Amino acid sequence: MSLRAALLALIEAGGPSSGYDLTKRFEGSLAYVWQASHSQIYPELNRMAADGLLRVEAEGSRGRKTYSITAAGRSELHQWLLETKPEQRVRNEGALRAFLIPLLPREEALGLLREELRHVEARRAELETLCSDVGESSFGRYALERGLRHLVASREWALWAIERLQKSEEARTETARTPTGEL
Amino acid sequence: MSLRAALLALIEAGGPSSGYDLTKRFEGSLAYVWQASHSQIYPELNRMAADGLLRVEAEGSRGRKTYSITAAGRSELHQWLLETKPEQRVRNEGALRAFLIPLLPREEALGLLREELRHVEARRAELETLCSDVGESSFGRYALERGLRHLVASREWALWAIERLQKSEEARTETARTPTGEL
DNA sequence: AGGATCATGTAAAGAGTTACATGATTCT
DNA sequence: AGAATCATGTAACTCTTTACATGATCCT
């Protein structure tokens, strides 16, 4: 259902589009929020057209099909936006790794955290560029801002975790206790 | 693969467990990070036992099977932790909604944002309770902290977005321009 | 005895990924 | 002419959700 909403929204915001266009837009800004590949998008567009949410407006060269949104599609999107609960059902591999960190010996845990930090900072630079490119009032501005704030949170967390681990390492060294076991 | 890693980690951290136990633990703290229901867990445990990652240690009353982790399982978990890239492939319905907000008329957008805010604050209270219950040094402490920081980020974002929308509303009212179209 | 909880499964359908496949057009 | 890109699809597989199904044990 989320895929439908995303496609409807992209067409609503960007005007009539082909599956190819929409695939590109998924790879662009929407990628920070939701992913879909052409093999998922094309069949979905066909189903949505069959369900009356979209209309094939034109068939161009190279078999290009341009879909536009119908009244039913608009109402479906509206419905979805208002009815979807902010359940925060997250399935987040990064967070899962965070959960598992205490299972690793310190050095490896620190390695992971530093890698995470590097990754988050690179991503943040990327997003910040996008943010300034995109200016103040663009579709996606809200999502961009949200993404940025979450990246900052991830960064702060990684720094916190690294410091925490290092402190406990110092404590361990000072009291010369036996090292914790391997994973 | 993430499900395997999560199960291996739960057994590694919590000792030999049954599918029922693991299902409960998924509903507990791990739910903030990854979800799985018993119908996914039971078959996966059987496959993992067949693959030599787990061993059925005991069969208790009511058909209870207790799985323990094997050396192969431990090494698989280790592998997963070190090899999984922090790709941040997120599929986040909340963020998708954020992306779509500009499509809604202001009042509805504000409604959504306020609902989001309420939800985030409730969740945060929940997590903060968990955090203090759980104390300083528990398995899951890192994930909890990470979750909290992300909730704070979501909260700040929602406040920012609400303010932004209200400001643009004021601007609109002052200059008495025509309202933006319906979705 | 009856209800709650423990405990495990399977089946069907939906969502998502990866790989395979094809052909048209544009650019150099 | 050949490479890049445009453009759409299908098939097989994995992962996830929802619903169906069953029986044992514990507690009152």
Image: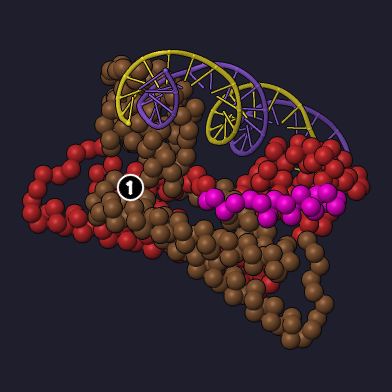
Chain colours: A brown, B red, C yellow, D purple
Left or right of C2? Residue B101 is left
Q: Residues within 10 Å of mark 1 (few under 14, many from 20)?
A: some
Q: Residue B149, image x and y in percent?
A: 50, 65
Residue under numbered circle 1? A140
Give the letter of the chain under mark 1: A
> Where B167 falls versus A68 (above or below)?
below
Image point (48%, 46%), residue name: B92
- Residue at (53%, 67%) from the top-left corner? A157
Please identify the dominant SS of the magenta region. Answer: helix
Q: In which quarter of the image is the C terminus of chain A?
A: bottom right
On the image, the x and y values in percent for residue B59 come to 91, 44
Q: In this view, does A128 lie to the left or right of A36?
A: left
**Camera-nearest residue between A21 and B62:** A21
Q: Does the rendering let one see residue B60?
A: no
Q: Can residue A88 be seen in this view?
A: yes
Q: In which quarter of the image is residue B130?
A: bottom right
Q: Count the numbered circles shown.
A: 1
B85 is within the stretch colored magenta: yes
In the depicted view, which residue is nearer to us: A26 or B63? Answer: A26
Please state if B52 lies on the left or on the right of A71 as rendered: right
Classify B130 as above or below D11.
below
Residue at left offset 57%, top offset 47%: A91
Residue at position x 43%, y 59% in the image: A124
**Does the magenta portion include A155?**
no
Disc 1 on helix, strand or loop? Answer: loop
Picture coordinates of residue D5, whole percent (x, y): 38, 31
Horizontal side, residue A166 vs residue A10: left or right: right
Q: What residue type is labelled 1?
A: Gly
Residue placed most toward the observer, C8 or A29: A29
What range is drawn magenta here? B69-88
Residue A65 in picture, x, y percent from top left: 34, 20
